[in-house]
Image: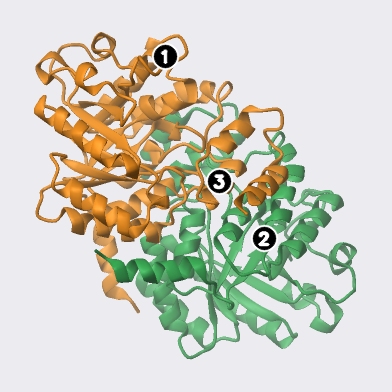
Chain colours: A green, B orange
């Protein structure tokens, strides 16, 4: 009998890790479902729910370049103008930290990321693919020098070779970033892979004081399970969205994550209320969460774009044709 | 860097375990959603899909006592008369094994389980709670003597104390059962707990030749993740249902499980076709799968019956009141 193991894991379920920080990215990742067009009331409710739930960060959207993206086509949370954020979060002191995401090569960061003293933003999360690491590191440097906490989000890790990943982590370890996230962009990682990656990232950041984080997608209903696994393996920052809102299959649902964490500072009830008041009606008009096309792209370790296209097209439920097509394209 | 671990888990994702046996319990667990009232066409399609998918077993329903349960109130798959099963599976030799579930204290097993030579059934799975172990062991003995493969399903393991579980496993180890399943009846186990339980069951069965199995529920979107974890920890029998059909939050979805397993004998495509042709329309009339009330009962380690009642009542989406009520009842 494995009594010692059982006792060890019992500890884990009963106690809590005070260092663990939760970021709610409902508005940011949910913006990918709506082209970042949200009513102010929606954004205010999500923000307020995040505050009441006790999570550490709330992410408002992207700082996308207006030279690249049209403000007609995209809503204001694609750009996160300072005034727009302030209209939601106000100017009073707050316990929750405000973050934005800045994509490498798609952000005019020198101009659009203001000096910290002019901004309510606390944290800039720089997202990049492996080939954009130098640009991303320059963005991290810029944000840090302006006074922000800067994080690295290395996307699509499931298609990065171990050697390239090792090199990237070495560069990140020497950077100004306060932390680095494992990003399962395609929802294709199994929990054991998440465990191995977390240990690899932790080892690479050892001695630097940098945190390791995890951002899940739910293509195979593994978003929550993988987030737990990252936490157990030592990650101290994890992302979630209310009711799992997010592009395609969505993200780790905040209501499940808070049910798992036992830190008394977190409150589940406001999140349940938001699921009921906001997300139930939203399901009538928007498609997100587990469905078979997203499971297929996850299984094939591919970007969900084909599945999103299919779900928005004339035959959203023709799973078999979609499977045949995706398998065919693989060869 | 954790290169060795990474290589070990890569092996796991690329190879496959030939000893692993899958049981499709769509008809049996799905019967709990419909009071076991299915059209013959439905049952035939599920059976045919199971055959084409290459799974090892297909479970047709319960062998419930007609003295306890009314044949007016329940459909025929609650009782699994020999003729009813034969009308679906025919008399020709088949590769797939046929199983039925027999609940302790709710089965007239001496009469209703026929001698094997009179039956197309291959396997009797005896389900019991911890206090019914002696009855269940007598049922296992009876089924074995009649010529069947008999399995033990010890339900609601998440509310059994470790000491009682140890005693139960010792008795099962000495029994005629060919295997014993870890049954997460409330969908409340985390993967680490599944790992510990699997190791505990494996240790208790060591040297007996008995298999350890796992049966998940999906209350917290952990059904698939927990099934993977049980497999990694050594379980060699796991259950799944097509599209996750099952009472409340449902079960581990077969389409996800087959996407994970790499044994060439399994085929995903017929399962996707069944999801599309059968389960998409069925979602218009039946409620199963992840929803917040089931997540709440899972989190509280309680039977889903209150959530099922709520979902079938006048306020199926009043998550906050349900949470308040469940928390209140806890105290």
Count of marks, rendered view: 3
State the CA–CA distance, disc 1 to disc 3: 27 Å
| Chain at tag 1 | B
Q: Position of residue B76 (x, y in %)?
A: 37, 13
Residue A252 as seen in the image, left or right of residue B180: right
Provide the residue designation for mark 2: A25
Secondary element under disc 1, as helix, strand or loop, is: loop
Q: Position of residue A210 (x, y in %)?
A: 54, 83
Provide the residue designation for mark 1: B75
Residue A198 as seen in the image, left or right of residue B227: right
Residue B46 as seen in the image, left or right of residue A43: left
Residue A293 to residue B171: above or below: above
Same chain shared by disc 2 and disc 1 = no
**Nearest the camera: B310 or A127?**
B310
Residue A259 to residue B128: above or below: below
The quarter of the picture where residue B90 lies is top left
State the CA–CA distance, disc 3 to disc 2: 26 Å
**Can residue A331 be seen in this snapshot?**
no
| Chain at tag 2 | A
**Can residue B87 be seen in this snapshot?**
yes
Provide the residue designation for mark 3: B297
State the CA–CA distance, disc 2 to disc 1: 46 Å
């Amino acid at each position: 009998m494995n009594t010692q193991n059982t006792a060890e894991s019992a500890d884990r379920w009963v106690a809590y890790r005070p260092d663990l920080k939760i970021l709610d990215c409902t508005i940011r990742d949910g913006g990918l479902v709506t082209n970042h067009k949200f009513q102010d009331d929606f954004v205010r409710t999500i923000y307020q729910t995040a505050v009441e739930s006790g999570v550490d960060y709330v992410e408002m959207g992207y700082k996308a370049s207006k030279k690249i993206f049209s403000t007609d086509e995209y809503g204001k949370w694609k750009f996160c103008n300072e005034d727009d954020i302030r209209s939601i979060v106000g100017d009073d002191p707050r316990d929750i930290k405000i973050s934005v995401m800045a994509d490498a090569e798609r952000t005019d960061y020198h101009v659009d990321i203001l000096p910290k003293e002019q901004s309510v933003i606390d944290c800039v999360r720089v997202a990049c693919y492996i080939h954009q690491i130098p640009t991303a590191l320059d963005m991290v440097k810029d944000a840090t020098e302006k006074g922000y906490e800067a994080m690295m989000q290395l996307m699509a890790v499931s298609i990065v070779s171990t050697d390239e990943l090792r090199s990237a982590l070495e560069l990140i370890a020497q950077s100004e970033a306060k932390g680095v996230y494992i990003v399962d962009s395609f929802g294709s990682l199994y929990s054991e892979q998440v465990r191995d990656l977390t240990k690899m990232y932790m080892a690479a950041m050892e001695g630097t004081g940098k945190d390791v984080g995890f951002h899940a997608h739910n293509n195979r209903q593994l978003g929550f399970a993988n987030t737990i696994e990252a936490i157990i393996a030592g990650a101290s920052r994890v992302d979630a969205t209310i009711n799992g809102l997010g592009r395609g299959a969505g993200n780790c649902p905040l209501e499940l994550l808070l049910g798992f964490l036992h830190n008394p500072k977190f409150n589940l009830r406001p999140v349940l209320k938001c699921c009921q008041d906001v997300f139930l009606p939203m399901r009538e008009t928007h498609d997100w969460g587990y469905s078979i096309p997203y499971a297929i792209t996850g299984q094939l370790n591919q970007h969900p774009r084909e599945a999103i296209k299919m779900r928005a097209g004339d035959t959203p439920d023709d799973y078999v044709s979609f499977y045949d097509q995706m398998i065919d394209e693989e060869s």
